[in-house]
Image (tube, helix red, strand yellow):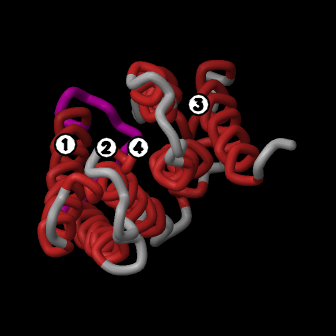
Amino acid sequence: MVSLPLLIDLALKVSVVALSLVPILRPGAGHFAGKAMGFRAAVYPAAVLLIPAVWLVSGQPGPYPFLADIALGIPFLVDAAGNVFGLFAIRGFDAIPHFTGWLCLSLAFGLAVAPLLPERWIAFGLALGFGAVADVTWEIGEFLLMRSGASGLDLTYENTIQDLAMSLTGAVVGAALIATLLWPAPGTPATLFGWQ
């Protein structure tokens, strides 16, 4: 029998790939213009395959990190769906993918490294730092894309500050979850994802 986490994980991956391909199949749709959709169509499917690739290269250790894998895929699903369905045109919608995205990215990273760490506060700091650095890098990428002539991002100073604030808030929540509710159980092997 197929487990529920596996079904959720596979559905998420199929959805990310399908939604990432829509802009390639409908290049004339105006709401895709200037948003680097070709880049996203390549990177998003690759991103959701990162944990399975690490797992395969590591010899398929157990248990499989479904929660981390699902968490890693959620930001790409939300962004791809938001673009395909034109949700970014809704005022304030951008706050949702930034909060959930960096919460989930910090969570996935924290679930990977927490078993390697001796103290909760170190895991909190690393997960938060990862989220903050990832978001600043994302915002720099958006700025460079805008400076290169992309017209579809509609970036403003206010938008960038909102993105940074929401992403940092999401990263704080993700890091706090790692240091509290999702802290590895006693006896978890000190390996990536607690693999045995």
Q: Secondary structure at mark 3?
A: helix
As shown in the figure, which amino acid type bears the numbered disc 4? Trp
Image location (x, y in percent) of residue 39: 41, 23
Chief secondary structure of the magenta portion: loop
Q: Are marks 2 and 3 in contact (CB under 8 Å)?
A: no
Query: Pointer 3: what residue?
Result: 20
Circle nearer the viewer, 3 or 4: 4
Q: Are marks 3 and 4 in contact (CB under 8 Å)?
A: no
Q: Is residue 75 above or below residue 35?
A: below
Circle nearer the viewer, 1 or 2: 2
| Label 1 Cα neighbours within 10 Å, binned few <14 / some 14-19 / many ≥20 | some
Whole-angstrom CA distance, mark 2 to mark 3, is 29 Å
Image location (x, y in percent) of residue 59: 45, 22
Q: Which mark is residue 195?
A: 4
- Classify the position of the C terminus by image quarter: top left
Q: Are marks 1 and 2 in contact (CB under 8 Å)?
A: no
Whole-angstrom CA distance, mark 4 to mark 1, is 39 Å
Q: Say which of 165 and 174 sits in front.
A: 174
Q: Say which of 50 and 112 sits in front.
A: 112
As shown in the figure, which amino acid type bears the numbered disc 3? Ser
Nearest to N terminus: mark 4 or mark 1: 1
Query: Pointer 1: what residue?
Result: 143
